[in-house]
Amino acid sequence: MSKPPKLASENLQRTVSDISFELTKEEIDDLKLPAICEVENAKCECCGMCEECTPEYIDRVREKFNGKWVCGLCAEAVKEELEKNGGEKEKALSAHMSACVRFNKYGRAFPVLFQAQAMKEMLKKSTRDGRRAKSISPRDKAGPKKGGIARSSSCIPALTREINDIKIAN
């Protein structure tokens, strides 16, 4: 089988749909199309993320959140905070904003320390609530409870072996 012959670009014609052909015949002035509004970059006042939004949308969000522009992710977090504190929007917004400020200040610069601090706060909260974090270990006399996951051995020797192998290879 042979390839089909190539067409010269001079023979190509533009296709026009029936509707666009009819519109070119009629006066387009009769059609009143809404103006296309420009989008703006809006920066979230909590996390600092930027989104492209219409000015109308920005105004609606600012009305919802006491004059502050909040991105979609932070808006969901504020809704969760609203459910926790009983429906006070101002408190929920300020609680989320302070969490974002704390994360942006320390969490981005020192992620490991920020995670350690979060774990520390979780443990403090669990002891305040009267619950105690319990370790499930095979060394316990009673043994692991049903449904729990027990650690059979440590992975640290394997990791250190791999790290030592990498150093020797270099």
Image (cartoon, rainbow, N blue to C red):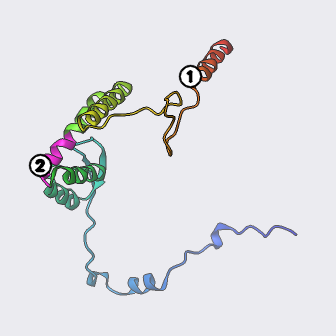
Residue annotated with mark 2: 90
Find the magenta span and give its range.
87-97
Amino acid on which the number 1 mark rests in the picture: Ile
Q: Residues within 10 Å of mark 2 (few under 14, many from 20)?
A: few
Main SS category, magenta section: helix
Residue under the point 50% across and 46% down: 147
Q: Residues within 10 Å of mark 1 (few under 14, many from 20)?
A: few
User: What percent of the width, then of the height, locates residue 83?
Assistant: 21, 54
Residue annotated with mark 1: 156
Whether 130 is drawn above or below 67: the answer is above
Identify the image quadrant of the C terminus: top right
Helix, strand, or loop for circle 2?
helix
Residue under the point 59% across and 75% down: 13
Query: Which quadrant of the structure image shows residue 131?
Result: top left
**Label 2, label 1: how far apart the Cα atoms are:** 47 Å
Is residue 67 visible in this depiction of the protein? no
Amino acid on which the number 2 mark rests in the picture: Glu
Helix, strand, or loop for circle 1?
helix
| Furthest-front residue in this view | 142
| Residue 75 horizontal side relative to residue 161, left or right | left
Q: Nearer the viewer, residue 3 or 111?
A: 111
